[in-house]
Image: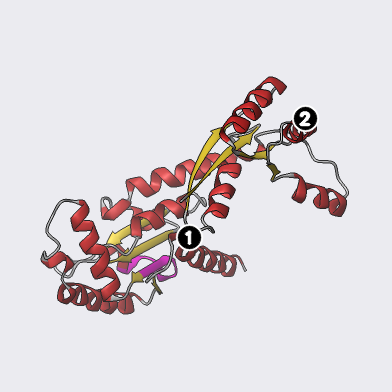
Amino acid sequence: MKNVKIFALSDSIGETSEQVSKAVLEQFDEIDYDIKLYPHVKTRKQIDDIIEDAKKENAVIVFTLVVVELRDYLIVKSKTHNVTSVDLITPLLTPLIEHIGLKPKREPGLLHKFDENYFRKMDAIEFAVKYDDGKDTRGITLADVVLIGISRTSKTPLCMYLANKNIKAANIPLVPEVDPPEELMKANAGKIVGLFADPEYLNRIRKERLKVLGLRDNASYASLDRIIKELEYADRYIKKLGCKKIDITNKSIEETASIIINWHNDIAKKERE
């Protein structure tokens, strides 16, 4: 097992350097990696210290520096000390400057300013928490998107992901023994999404969930017969609503969310026309 060390350096919070590094490192088998974050780098002294540590630990520096002076200083210092460094900003910024014909602001942290978009995102996250798992059915009326489905169809993580895209999402569990809230039948089917999955896929997930909780995996909750019964009930109800239906089997949260976002945007566009 090969160990790889990454120093994610930025003049902002460093999220871009960290996430891009993770995405690339996941492409390699048989490696163990460690990513150390260095946010808010503003001085040459900070860069000197980071390069010294990187040399000692044989680390690769992955950086996003928009201030030209600091970027150039880091590049020169890295070469001098034989430390590998990767600039994530310049390869995209330079051709954009040529294409657009405008000068960039070169101001760190613009992506994370407390602007109107930031507060909309916070509102959406608070909404997702408040109206999670049918705790308050008033969320059905107030939501941009309502997710319905049986247990372990990724309703909650999808709501949180959508919230980070400024979409207010509520979710309602479907259980054969419990009547769904009346608000669902009254709501616009155009904002409701029914989630389902392959029974054996859900069977594996539910068994893992019981293990995490320290329970035996032969409980009726995880039985294939029970899951099929729940799915059949949910399918009948989803057809009754006439809403969109998505199979989440083997899909990542990001992939399913992308389908929902594109669908939501199409609906919103049609409503504006």
Nearer to me, 167 or 3: 3
Nearer to me, 178 or 58: 58
Q: Which residue is mark 1?
A: 254
Amino acid on which disc 2 is placed: Tyr
Picture quarter with the C terminus: bottom right
Q: Residue at x 43, y 45 (%)?
A: 125
Where residue 186 sits, quadrant-wise, is bottom left
Q: Residue at x 20, y 72 (%)?
A: 227
Amino acid on which disc 1 is placed: Glu
Residue 130 drawn above or below residue 10: below
Q: Could you say whether the residue bearing mark 1 is in a helix, strand or loop?
A: helix
Nearer to me, 128 or 182: 128
Marks 2 and 1, how far apart in space?
37 Å
Q: Residue at x 63, y 32 (%)?
A: 55
Q: Which residue is mark 2?
A: 73
Which circle marks residue 231 in the picture?
none
Q: Residue at x 86, y 45 (%)?
A: 102
